[in-house]
């Protein structure tokens, strides 16, 4: 079946945005807002430059490491919180305090401990990722049906085994929803951390160009970061769809209705 | 086989208030007996079943199974819940195999056994379906097969057909009796349907409104194997149903037993 609507709509949205930008920039005529065509023209140059590719690579490396460590730490905490009132009572106030703090705002403090290198930036990304993943894992773990756990207990599974073999898969759709939020936050904290501690990375190129009034490059970088976010999210959604296909709603098959 | 000895259960309903769910229940169930627990909703009949399963502890009293005190769940007491409680990330085959694999049965053997059971509950051909793709009746068939798979000698059934439509319900009742006739496991079956209780059981245990007490235990003396078509026409079946319904409608007087 050919359904042009859903495929064309996002392309139309992108095109409309670019046209509005182009026209707006030409009408406004401000230095700080170059037309879309000028900014987009910079993209091949940036992506063709080995040095900027190294920067992008460094950013992605920190992001992946921070994200992976964040998920690895957050999922066990969230799942245990969901199954134990005591663990939840212990972590909940801590999370409440940490949640509203913008993680990038901690960057200057963290730099005092760990310097301006990879360690500080990865830690900030880690902090940005952990909270949403903990929160979603906690909700997912709490919602696991009691009777499902009892069924497993009757098979002779101990509580720790149930946490890994029942709670984890049962909560996976919710955990992955948290990871998706975490992934976007990882990208945001990655760029912000590089704004504060400039040395390498996507954010470094962006903010250095801003300082040097190379606005075409600034906007080109913004487009690149946006595209990167889009690609990462799409890749993640693809993976998520494969992992939790069993949870997606579908019509029950009514052949032989018993 | 099962000895329920002076079991009471009190729930903490918050703010220091306590709610008495079960008051002094004593009951003995013989090996191979099919016993239904019948009562109005909220009378604690499911709670009693969960206590026998070892899923929740009694407040006082004890449950002995084969002479040993119940301290927690065991593969010897297999539950089947109204909510099915299947593992949604596993296929039908995966669900039925699960308990076998946990008990250390090899993959090949577990698969072969699971396929037999799936055929026995009339779901051959659905091995690779996920629970979300099945109707309620089919899900409950999978749940029954999953529990039978690890070979419990006692089945604890918590209103297993309560959420199914009338037609599906009678088909599953018939099939359950067929399965039960093969090896006559001990069954404790919670229901609020009088007809279902009389049709299936050797004895029907009636409970009062909350706090749940035993009101009456009625032996159902009807020939086995039973078939719904003959029983519905049988005067004795009708008498049991009408008699029990009358008893249920009686105001909750101080019945003692």
Image (spheres, coloured by chain):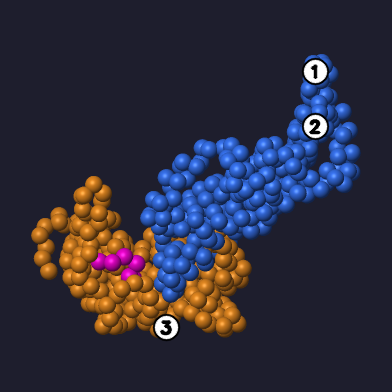
Chain colours: A blue, B orange
Residue drawn 29% across and 75% down? B70
* Quarter containing the N terminus of chain B: bottom left
Return the mark for residue A30. 1
- Chain to which mark 2 belongs: A
- Locate residue A70 relative to residue B1 in the image: left or right: right
Name the residue carrying label 2. Answer: A209
Residue B33 is a magenta residue: no
Residue B57 is a magenta residue: yes
Query: Which of A233 and B139 lies nearest the eye of the viewer?
Result: A233
Residue drawn 55% across and 80% down? B110
Q: Give the x, y percent position of residue A207.
A: 75, 33
Circle 3 SS class = helix
Residue drawn 81% across and 48% down? A54
Circle 1 SS class = loop
Residue drawn 24% across and 77% down? B3
User: As displayed, is residue B36 above or below residue A245?
Assistant: below
Q: Where on the picture, by quarter, is residue B177?
A: bottom left
Disc 3 residue crowd, few under 14, some 14–19, many 20+, Cα 10 Å? few
Task: Report the span colored magenta.
Answer: B53-58
Q: Nearer the viewer, mark 3 or mark 2?
A: 2
Disc 2 residue crowd, few under 14, some 14–19, many 20+, Cα 10 Å? some
Q: Where on the picture, by quarter, is residue A31?
A: top right
Q: How many angstroms separate mark 3 from mark 1 (CA)? A: 86 Å
Q: Give the x, y percent position of residue A210.
A: 77, 29
Name the residue carrying label 3. Answer: B182
Q: Where on the picture, by quarter, is residue B55?
A: bottom left
Q: Nearer the viewer, mark 1 or mark 2?
A: 2
Disc 1 residue crowd, few under 14, some 14–19, many 20+, Cα 10 Å? few
Q: How many angstroms separate mark 3 from mark 2 (CA)? A: 80 Å
Q: How many angstroms separate mark 1 from mark 2 (CA)? A: 17 Å
- Chain to which mark 3 belongs: B
Return the mark for residue A245. none
């Amino acid at each position: 079946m050919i359904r042009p609507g859903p495929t064309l709509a996002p392309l139309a949205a992108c095109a409309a945005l670019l046209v509005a930008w182009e026209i707006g920039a030409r009408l406004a005529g401000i230095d700080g807002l170059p037309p879309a065509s000028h900014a987009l023209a910079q993209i091949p140059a940036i992506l063709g430059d080995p040095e900027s590719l190294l920067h992008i690579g460094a950013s992605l490396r920190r992001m992946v490491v921070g994200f992976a460590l964040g998920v690895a730490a957050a999922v066990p905490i969230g799942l245990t919180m969901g199954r134990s009132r005591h663990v939840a009572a212990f972590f909940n106030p801590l999370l409440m305090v940490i949640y509203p703090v913008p993680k990038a705002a901690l960057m200057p403090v963290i730099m005092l401990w760990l310097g301006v290198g990879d360690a500080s930036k990865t830690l900030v990304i880690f902090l940005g990722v952990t909270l949403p993943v903990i929160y979603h894992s906690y909700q997912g773990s709490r919602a696991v049906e009691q009777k499902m756990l009892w069924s497993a207990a009757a098979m002779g599974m101990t509580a720790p085994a149930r946490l890994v073999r029942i709670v984890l898969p049962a909560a996976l759709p919710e955990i992955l929803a948290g990871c998706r939020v975490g992934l976007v936050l990882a990208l945001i904290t990655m760029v912000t951390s590089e704004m504060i501690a400039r040395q390498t990375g996507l954010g470094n190129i962006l903010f250095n160009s801003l300082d040097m009034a190379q606005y075409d490059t600034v906007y080109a970088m913004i487009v690149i970061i946006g595209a990167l976010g889009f690609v990462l999210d799409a890749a993640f959604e693809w993976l998520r769809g494969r992992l939790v296909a069993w949870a997606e709603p579908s019509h029950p098959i009514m052949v032989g209705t018993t | 086989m099962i000895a329920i000895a002076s079991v009471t259960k009190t729930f903490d309903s918050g703010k220091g208030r306590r709610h008495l769910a079960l008051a002094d229940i004593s009951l003995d169930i013989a090996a191979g007996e099919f016993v239904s627990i019948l009562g109005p909703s909220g009378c604690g009949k499911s709670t009693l079943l969960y206590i026998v399963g070892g899923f929740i502890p009694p407040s006082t009293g004890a449950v002995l199974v084969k002479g040993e005190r119940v301290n927690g769940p065991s593969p010897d007491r297999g539950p089947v819940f109204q909510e099915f409680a299947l593992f949604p990330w596993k296929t039908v085959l995966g669900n039925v195999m699960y308990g076998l694999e946990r008990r250390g049965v090899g993959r090949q053997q577990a698969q072969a056994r699971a396929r037999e059971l799936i055929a026995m509950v009339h779901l051959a051909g659905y091995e690779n379906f996920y629970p979300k793709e099945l109707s309620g009746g089919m899900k409950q068939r999978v749940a029954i097969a999953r529990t039978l798979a690890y070979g419990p000698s006692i089945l604890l059934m918590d209103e297993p057909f309560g959420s199914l439509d009338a037609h599906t319900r009678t088909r599953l009742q018939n099939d359950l009796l067929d399965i039960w006739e093969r090896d006559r496991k001990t069954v404790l079956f919670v229901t609020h349907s009088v007809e279902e209780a009389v049709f299936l059981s050797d004895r029907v245990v009636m409970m009062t409104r909350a706090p749940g007490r035993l009101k009456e235990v009625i032996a159902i003396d009807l020939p086995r194997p039973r078939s719904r078509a003959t029983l519905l026409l049988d005067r004795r079946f009708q008498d049991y149903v009408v008699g029990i319904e009358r008893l249920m409608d009686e105001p909750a007087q101080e019945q003692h037993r």
